[in-house]
Image: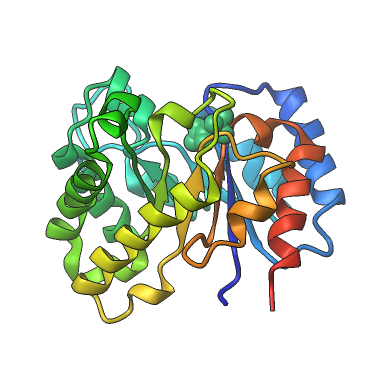
């Protein structure tokens, strides 16, 4: 079994003092971690977190689909690289929903990340309406297909996060069986595109917390978690890391 990856998504939260306290608490508890652990932080804090990250990998929450130039407010892949960023979330449902990001834009962002040597964490997931209409498989396959289409040659370098939109920030979690079923679909799709698909980390995200992490992470095709709310509280995030470590062989 490969080492699990636990990535925190701080979203638009934090402040200099709060970040420092959180990072200090996380690093104090990471010593025995047998999982890769990352924090995806707001862009203005990359420099601060790069200096204080200790054993944590540094991640960003978005990047531009463009290389450089007149794109006010955007942050390029090369800029993220300069701050020591390893992971960058692309296609989070909040970006798709509030910023109109299409499958094509998400695929191009993943392409920019890969070209710069960053690991894109590509988010896919269905809304409640789509799940109730029986469209879950169709939706996540369409979202992932766009990324595979543009990045097929290096698809084994990506991370995929299955994040059912109805489970994000709602306290409703997919059952381990529901999550595993979708992960198996995504794994099969990746296997059809790459001989190295088994090494791709497939993360589950959506109200993962200290209480439900162990059962979710024990599923065959769940290789880690993308954690929103619980990543802002050191004890909760560390409990999830401990659950992942306990599964390491
Ligand atoms: C997320 O934003 O990626 C997420 C999974 O959030 P939460 O854990 O708060 O549901």
Quick one: 76 or 189, which is closer to the camera?
A: 189
Quick one: 116 or 162, which is closer to the camera?
A: 162
Residue 195 at what x, y percent from top left? Answer: 27, 81
In the depicted structure, whether residue 67 falls above or below residue 95: below
Quick one: 38 or 210, which is closer to the camera?
A: 210
For residue 210, side relative to residue 31 (left or right) = left
Residue 129 at what x, y percent from top left? Answer: 28, 24
Residue at 66% x, 48% y: name it: 213
In the depicted structure, whether residue 171 falls above or below residue 30: above
The answer to whether residue 242 is seen in the rendering is yes
Image mark count: 0
Residue 171 placement: quadrant: top right
For residue 231, side relative to residue 184 (left or right) = right
Residue pushed farthest top? 98
Residue 81 at what x, y percent from top left? Answer: 43, 52
Residue pushed farthest right? 28
Residue at 47% x, 41% y: name it: 60
Colour setting: rainbow
For residue 160, side relative to residue 6 (left or right) = left
The image quadrant where one finds the N terminus is: bottom right
In the depicted structure, whether residue 101 falls above or below residue 51: above
For residue 209, side relative to residue 148 (left or right) = right
Residue 46 at what x, y percent from top left? Answer: 56, 38
Quick one: 208 or 109, which is closer to the camera?
A: 208
Residue 69 placement: quadrant: top left
In the depicted structure, whether residue 216 falls above or below residue 237: below
Residue at 31% x, 18% y: name it: 98
The answer to whether residue 119 is seen in the rendering is no
Residue at 71% x, 49% y: name it: 240
The image quadrant where one finds the C terminus is: bottom right
């Amino acid at each position: 079994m490969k080492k699990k990856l636990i990535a925190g998504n701080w979203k638009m939260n934090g402040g200099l003092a709060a970040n420092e306290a959180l990072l200090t608490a996380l690093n104090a508890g990471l010593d025995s971690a047998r999982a890769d652990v990352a924090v995806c932080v707001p862009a203005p804090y990359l420099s601060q977190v790069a200096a204080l990250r200790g054993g944590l990998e540094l991640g960003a929450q978005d990047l531009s689909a463009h290389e450089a130039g007149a794109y006010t407010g955007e942050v390029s892949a090369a800029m993220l690289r300069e701050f020591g960023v390893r992971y960058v979330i692309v296609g989070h449902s909040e970006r798709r929903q509030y910023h109109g990001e299409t499958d094509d834009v998400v695929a191009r962002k993943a392409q920019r990340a890969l070209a710069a040597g960053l690991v894109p964490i590509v988010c896919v997931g269905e809304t409640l309406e789509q799940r109730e209409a029986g469209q879950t498989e169709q939706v996540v396959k369409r979202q992932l297909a766009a990324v595979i289409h543009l990045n097929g040659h290096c698809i084994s370098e990506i991370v995929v996060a299955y994040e059912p939109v109805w489970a994000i920030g709602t306290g409703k979690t997919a059952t381990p069986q529901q999550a595993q079923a979708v992960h198996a679909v995504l794994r099969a799709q990746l296997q059809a595109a790459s001989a190295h698909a088994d090494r791709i980390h497939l993360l589950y995200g959506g109200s993962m917390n200290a209480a439900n992490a162990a059962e979710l992470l024990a599923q065959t095709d769940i290789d880690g978690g993308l954690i929103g709310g619980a990543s802002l509280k050191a004890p909760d995030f560390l409990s999830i890391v401990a659950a992942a470590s306990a599964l390491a062989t």
